[in-house]
Image (cartoon, rainbow, N blue to C red):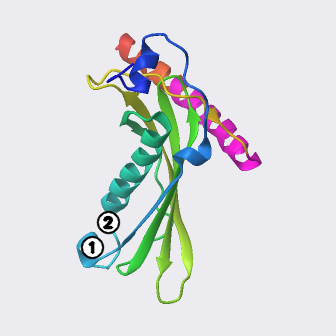
Amino acid sequence: MSGTSTAASHQSGSTPPPPRPVRDSQHETSELMMPQHANVLGHVFGGVVLSMLDRTAAISAIRHARSACVTASVDRVDFREPIHVGDLVIMKASVNYAGRTSMEVGVRVEAEDLITGRRRHTNSCYLTFVAVDRNGRPVEVPPLLAETPDEVRRHAAARERRRRRLEERNAEAQRSSRA
């Protein structure tokens, strides 16, 4: 199929894409926090961290789907402790679960004091992405191949979070249809 993306060809009902291992979606990035990233106390703005989370997770989703991906949701984000100007922020992301067209990506955020080398886990977050074609229509993604015990555990936890999100969305739809 010349000129047709693999992901787009799967939407038409041809052979399903082969499973892709978690390691294929892993991505790590880092950025030094500078004064423009922070408030007057020298604490990095939450929005700066959220923007980095979204970009980092998007790379993992795109690597898994090998297709354009859009952010569908961001689960609860708790900032456990502040990140300071001068800290190196490290984000580690990978796909935890892949449905038919959507994926959950987990991101772990750490802040490193570059002088002491001490790293702190500042927060974690789960983002849901949908793979889309050039017209913005959802396309099928490969199943996820969880190989290690940790990957299997993350996959099971992600399935449960997905189940709860769908229940909440259905309950919301029922409430709004009654209003």
Q: Earlier in the sequence, mark 1 or mark 2?
A: 1
Q: Nearer the viewer, residue 165 or 101?
A: 101
Tell me residue 69's x, y (percent).
37, 35
State the residue position of label 2: 45
Magenta highlight range: 148-166
- Say whether marks 1 and 2 touch (CB < 8 Å): yes
Residue at 39% from the left image edge and 18% from the top image edge? 1
Question: Along the horizontal axis of the image, is 159 left or right of 172?
Answer: right
Tell me residue 102's x, y (percent).
47, 29
The residue type indicated by label 1 comes to Asn
Q: Nearer the viewer, residue 163 or 12?
A: 12
SS category of the residue bearing label 1: loop
The residue type indicated by label 2 comes to Phe
Residue 153: in magenta span: yes
Q: Nearer the viewer, residue 63 or 155?
A: 63
Mark pair 1, 2: CA separation: 6 Å
State the residue position of label 1: 39
Tell me residue 20's x, y (percent).
59, 36
Q: Residue furthest right?
A: 149
Residue at 41% from the left image edge and 47% from the top image edge? 59
Residue 139 lies in quadrant: top left
